[in-house]
Amino acid sequence: MALLNQLSPHAFEWLVPGLLEEKLTELLRSLPKTLRKAFVPVPDVAHEAMETLKLPTVTFREGGSFLEAHKHSLYEALAVFCQRRLGKPLPTDSWELTSLPSHLLMNFRLLDTHNQFLTMGRDLVKLQQQWGSHASTECRREVATGSGLEREHFFLAEPLPTKQADFEQRLTDGKQRLMTVANEYVSSLEKVLEEYHTLTPQLHKFATRTTTVPEIKQHLKCLVYEGFLRDLPLPQLKHLPRYLKAVKLRLERLDYDPHKDAQKAAQLAPLWEAHWQRR
């Protein structure tokens, strides 16, 4: 539930690699007859489209392999492919999505925070419209709970209340501020995850650098790890995107001057080792 509003429909249009060619075939068959005759035999054209489109890629990271979500719409990408064959743009309503077999549309099961089933459907946008407000509230509540906001920022702040009236006032004040701070956590976390995600293809690119990449991965483990949101107070969390951008900048410069990177790494090595020993 809490993740519902963070999902992009574009990523799920691509399904899984094993079903994509079948989906392309059905999409081409759904074209109006006046257009479809330019794409026969349809299975062959669908196969050609598979070879032409930039498909989602599999990256390999610690913990297994991951299918990277596609940022662009499958329907838009296929329309561009068809436009090149036709020599003119396709009408925006060319695809008859309602005619697609259900197994060619991603199925979504919505669960609450206790993993209890709420609903299911194959139209993500419709689910977001129906359940989006509930999901937003749930997301903020989860961030507040998981990060220890109630404990750290409001209810157990010094000095502790010693009377019931003081405690109830602290509770009232805290509830009023909770959502504001939770929103700040969500915003900061979104920036962290965005920066962290962009590092994945760069690390894969430099996988053969046997010295540099393991060192950078070790640094990243100290920044983003299981429970980091719980451990970091909000002021420190806000700095995390900046640190991740610095890692990205180092990888970009590594491609141009690896020798200079090695020199700087050697200068920092004693400081890093001292920090690591204190952990």
Image: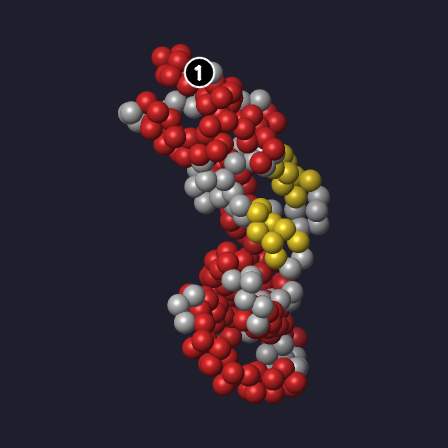
Task: Where is residue 203? Give x, y as percent.
Answer: 52, 61
Viewed as shown, does residue 168 lie left or right of 261?
right
The image quarter containing residue 60 is bottom right
Viewed as shown, does residue 243 lie left or right of 270?
left
Q: Residue at x 59, y 79 (%)?
A: 157
Give the residue at mark 1: 40
Could you tell me if residue 150 is visible in this image?
no
Q: Residue at x 56, y 61 (%)?
A: 207
Query: Quick one: 111 or 180, which is closer to the camera?
Result: 111
Mark 1 neighbour density, 10 Å: few (under 14) some (14–19) many (20 or more):
few
Task: Where is residue 176? Give x, y as percent.
Answer: 51, 65
* Disc 1, SS: loop
Amino acid beneath label 1: Val
Task: Where is residue 103? Give x, y as percent.
Answer: 61, 27
The image quarter containing residue 116 is top right
Compared with 178, 73 (above or below) is above
The image quarter containing residue 219 is bottom right
Compared with 227, 104 (above or below) is above
Q: Residue at x 63, y 41 (%)?
A: 110
Query: Quick one: 17 or 5, which is closer to the camera?
Result: 17
